[in-house]
Image: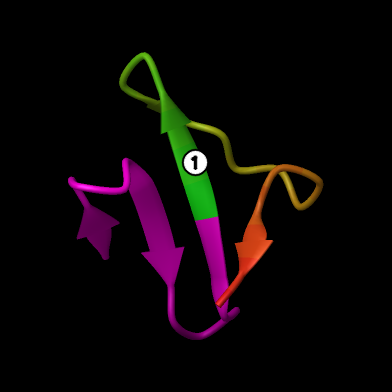
Amino acid sequence: TYDAKAQELISEKAKLAYPIRDGIPIMLMEEAREL
């Protein structure tokens, strides 16, 4: 799921939120935050 306000890509299954920088999702475990 895309969260435009937080600029994050949310993975409910993995329970992680990946940041989006300059329109590019950063799909790295080190960059993700737990939900």
Question: What type is the residue that disc 1 sits on?
Answer: Pro
Determine the residue located farthest toward the left in the rendered image: 4
Magenta stretch contains residue 16:
yes
Magenta stretch contains residue 9:
yes
Identified at 49% across, 41% down, the residue is 19
Residue 5 position, x and y percent, is 20, 47
- Which residue is denoted by mark 1 in the rendering? 19
Identified at 55% across, 77% down, the residue is 35
23 vs 5, nearest the viewer: 5
The residue segment tinted magenta is 1-17
Image quarter in which the N terminus is found: bottom left
Asked whether, in this view, residue 7 is left or right of residue 10, the answer is: left
Determine the residue located farthest toward the bottom in the rendered image: 13
Residue 31 position, x and y percent, is 71, 43
Q: Is residue 29 above or below residue 28?
A: below
Q: Quadrant of residue 34?
A: bottom right
Determine the residue located farthest toward the top in the rendered image: 22
Asked whether, in this view, residue 10 is left or right of residue 23, the answer is: right
Q: Is residue 13 above or below residue 20?
A: below
Identified at 76% across, 52% down, the residue is 29
Query: How dense is the environment of label 1, judged by Cα within 10 Å: few (below 14), some, or many (20 and up)?
Result: many
Q: Secondary structure at mark 1?
A: strand
Residue 15 position, x and y percent, is 57, 80
Q: Is residue 19 above or below residue 33?
A: above
Asked whether, in this view, residue 15 is left or right of residue 30, the answer is: left
Residue 13 position, x and y percent, is 51, 85
Q: Is residue 3 above or below residue 23?
A: below
Asked whether, in this view, residue 29 is left or right of residue 32, the answer is: right
